[in-house]
Image (spheres, rainbow, N blue to C red):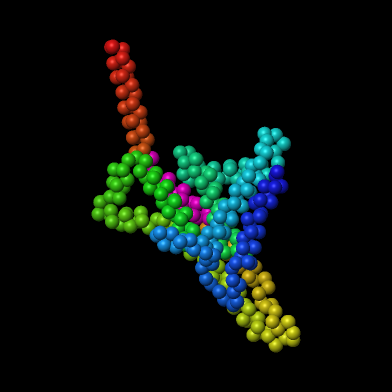
Amino acid sequence: MTLLLLILAIIPLIAGVVIKIMFVPASSGIDITGAHIFFTIDLPMGGLPITEAQVNSWLVILSLFFFCLFLTHDLKTTDMSIRQLIAEWIVEKVEGLVRSNMGEFFICFAPFIAAILGLSACSSLLTLIGLFPPTSDINIVAGWAIMTFILITYYKFKAGPWIYIRSFGEPVPFLAPLNIISEVATPISMAFRHYGNVLSGSIISVLVSALLTTLSQLIFGKLPGFLGEFPFLRIGLPAILSIYFDLFSGCLQAFIFAMLTMLYVSGGFPEDEYFKRKRMKEAKRKQQNVQLENTNGGI
């Protein structure tokens, strides 16, 4: 069963490579385009394109789902496997990250933050196997940012709508227009920061590879046979760039997006007002219970 779950975690990635080979047209030279559109679903409000970014995003979700099942399968209290130790280490680290940045009240956010980290990092790392990274599509990242913005707004409303509206007038009322713009700009900045950094890395890697190919032809083009066509200068340097743009930058952007999510949600939560309102409700409920008991006792 354990081996089967591991195989199921790898199959979506293999399927992504097969889909790319079969349905995505091969490119020649420098080709910097968006996600390939496989087909479009006709809807009353317009066409819904099914793109390479959407397909790859679902493949990453499936792969992570089965990988999590692989790590957490057959848990034990003694004689723990390496899989279980890795799973427990991930849980402890994510819970510690949430606790240190959001506080104990938001410890329930640990699974959500782990999902953001895993989905974002693995989506960016798809470039290592030649697949289009969903994080290079603004539509994918914007969906994550909108979901985060909904959570931010929800927790800002925790202390009541009046507290939320009043927050736009802080620290002084005439700054309300700027605070409103800042509120709307939150998901936009989160989306474009993540999308822009991942996309720029892909573009730089393609341009450097094309430049090295051209220089290689200029320098070694007069060599006989295949030696004149072999891109000698592309050996090594693109791999170094890949380590930075694909590994380091992709994981870094995932961490930054998760950190911003935690800071925006916890920072917008009016904790003092929320617990004050909660204490008032509890006191009012106790008073109503006492009055009800007195009324029943009098009867």
| Of residues 173 and 230, the one drawn nearer to the viewer in this rendering | 230
Q: Position of residue 125 (x, y in %)?
A: 60, 60
Pinpoint residue 74: horizontal percent, then vertical percent: 67, 38
Identify the residue at horizontal 31%, vertical 27% (top origin).
284
Of residues 202 and 66, the one drawn nearer to the viewer in this rendering: 66
Query: Image quarter for residue 78?
Result: top right
Q: Percent from the top left, x then y, of residue 2?
A: 70, 44
Q: Is the magenta stretch mostly helix, strand or loop?
A: helix
Residue 72 appears anywhere in the view = yes
Question: What segment is highlighted magenta in the picture?
Answer: 254-271
| Residue 121 lies in quadrant | bottom right
Answer left or right for 112 relative to 281.
right
- In the picture provided, is 145 more to the left or to the right than 16? left
Measuring 29% from the left and 43% from the top, which residue is drawn there? Answer: 162
Quadrant location, the N terminus: top right
> Which of the pair 207/31 is nearer the observer?
31
Residue 259 highlighted magenta (yes or no): yes
Percent coordinates x, y for residue 62 in the rendering: 59, 51
Q: Residue furthest left?
A: 174
Pick the residue in front: 119 or 93.
Answer: 119
| Furthest residue in direction bottom, as rendered | 222
Classify residue 246 as left or right of residue 166: right
Residue 186 position (above or below residue 24) = above
Task: Work out whether residue 251 can be spotted.
Answer: no
Residue at the spot x=74%, y=84% of the render? Answer: 225
User: Which quadrant holds residue 127?
Assistant: bottom right
Q: In this view, does 123 lie above or below 269?
A: below
